Image (spheres, rainbow, N blue to C red):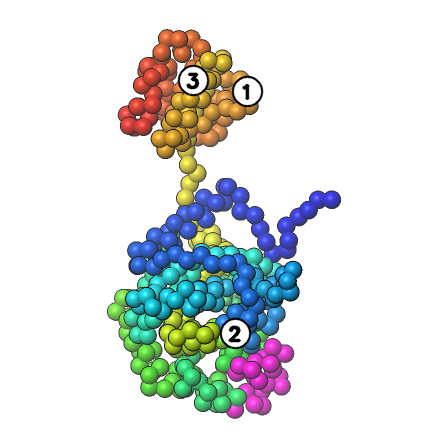
Amino acid sequence: MKISLPKGTKDILPGEMIKWNYIENAFSNVCKNAGYGEIRFPVFEYTDLFNRGVGDSTDIVQKEMYTFEDKSGRSLTLRPEGTAGVVRSYIEKGMSSLPQPVKLFYMITAYRYENVQKGRYREFNQFGAEIFGAKSPYADIEVISILSNFYSALGIRNLALEINSIGCRVCRPAYNIKLKEYYKDKIKGMCADCKKRYETNPLRLLDCKNENCIAISADAPFITDNLCGECATHFSGFKNGLDKMNIDYTVNKGIVRGLDYYTKTVFEFVSENVGTQGTICGGGRYDGLVESLGGKDVPGIGFSMGVERLLMELESRGIILGKPERPEIYFVTVGEKAYAYARNLSCALRKAGIFTEMDLLGRSVKAQMKDANRKNTIYTVVMGDDEISQNKAVIKIMDTGEKKDVSLDSIFKRITEKKV
Ligand code: ATP
Ligand code: MG
C-alpha cells in the first residue's frame, strides 16, 4: 500500500527550500540586528500550558489541539503556537533575573487540527518574536518596526497594518458588560460559536468571520472609546510612534485576536492574497500572561507570522527570492587516473568552501557535459589520463564559451583565489 502525507501537511523539497532559506535568513538577520536572541523549545508541552496560556475559550483550545497521552499517561499537546512555550521557558529558566528587556525570536512548526483550505494547514510554520519586561509603547513600536524591516527586506511594500487596543483588566470588564448589552437581543440570530463567545468571551464576538455576524456587529461599541486612562495613553503613544516612523496603519475595532492573553495593543498585517482569513501576521501585548503561568508580573509583547501565508503573499506579488547555487567547477573526466585526480581535487576544493560537481554514475563524456550544462556550472574542466601525465588542462568559462589552457596543478589556486 502506498503511504501518503497526513492531511494538512507537506514536504518542502530542495527546489523550494531556496526561498525558505532566504526568508529564514532575512528574518533571523532582522531580529539579530535589533538585539533578539534565537530560542528553540519543544514541539510538545504539557497540555495544561496551552489550556492556561492560550486560553480555554479560544478556538485553539476548544477544537484545534493535537492532544495525546504518552505511555505514562501524561497529557501532552503538539504546540499550536509559540508564545506559550517561550513564556514557559522564560519563567522556568529564570529569565526574569536577567537584565530586562529580554528579547527572543523563533522559527517553528505549529500544529492545529483545522479544516484544511488555502492558507490553513495542520502543520504550518511560524516566525515570531517576543519582548519581556518592557511596559512602554516603545516596545510595541519596535515590534512593528522589525516587521516593517523584514517585509521591506523581502521587497514587500505597503502591507496593510491594522491595529487596535483591547484594554486591560481595569477597563475590559466594563466594556464586556456594554458589549453584552449591545448583543443581548441580537445573539439569537448569530452563529453557534458566537452564542458560546457571548457567555465566555464577549470581546471575541467582534472577531467572528461569519458574514451575518459581521453585519450584526457593525454598530457595536468601540473598545477604543472605552479604555481606561493608562490604556488610552498607551494606545496614543503607540500611534504617535508609528506616525513618527511613517508607518501607515488603520485602527480596526474588529481586531481582538483569537488568544485570551492579549492586553492593550493588538495588531495584524493583512492581505487579500492569503485565503479567507487574510491575516499574515498577528500580535499584541500580553501583560498578564507571565504571571498567570506562575512567573513574576512581567509585561510582554510579541507577534507570530504564518510563513506559508507569507510565501503566498510573495507569490501573488511576483516576488522571487533566492536562486539555485551554481557549481563553481564541474570536472568532466575520462579514464581511471583522471577520475581519481578530479575526485581528490574536487574534495580539496569543497574543503576550501567551493561548490564543485562531478559524475558518480560512470557516465560518458557527452553525458557529463550535458549534466554540467543542466547544473549551470560556472567552469568545466575536461580531463583524460593524458592530461594528468602532462600536467595540463583546459578550463572552459561556460557563460562565454571561452577556453583557457592551464596547468592542472594551478586549478586549485585559480579557483580559490577567483583568478581563472
Ligand atoms: P486565523 O484567524 O487565520 O485562524 P489565528 O488567529 O488562529 O488565525 P494566530 O494564532 O494568531 O492565528 O497565528 C499567527 C499566524 O499564524 C496567523 O496570522 C497565520 O498567518 C498563521 N496561521 C494560523 N493558523 C494557521 C494554519 N492553520 N495554517 C497556516 N497558517 C496559520
Ligand atoms: Mg485560527
State which tag comes first along the sequence, 2 or 3. 2
Q: Position of residue 342 (x, y in %)?
A: 43, 20
Occupied quadrant, residue 146: bottom left
Q: Residues within 10 Å of mark 1 (few under 14, many from 20)?
A: few
State which tag comes first along the sequence, 2 or 1. 2
Residue carrying label 3: 341
The residue at the point 47 percent across, 17 percent down is 339
Residue carrying label 1: 362
The disc labelled 3 sits on which kind of residue?
Tyr
- Residue 52's disc number: 2
The disc labelled 1 sits on which kind of residue?
Gly
Pointer 2 and pointer 3: residues touching (CB < 8 Å)? no
The residue at the point 41 percent across, 86 percent down is 171
Q: CA distance from mark 2 to mark 1?
A: 61 Å
Q: Nearer the viewer, residue 320 or 349?
A: 349
The residue at the point 44 percent across, 50 percent down is 318
Pointer 3 and pointer 1: residues touching (CB < 8 Å)? no
Which secondary structure, mark 3? Answer: helix
Occupied quadrant, residue 294: bottom left
Query: Which quadrant holds the C terminus?
Result: top left
The residue range painted magenta reads 181-202
> As drawn, is 398 to the left or to the right of 203?
left
Q: Is residue 252 above or below residue 396?
A: below
The disc labelled 2 sits on which kind of residue?
Arg
The residue at the point 52 percent across, 83 percent down is 202
Query: Which quadrant holds the N terminus?
Result: top right
| Whether residue 120 can be seen here | no
Extreme right residue here?
1
| Whether residue 227 can be seen here | yes
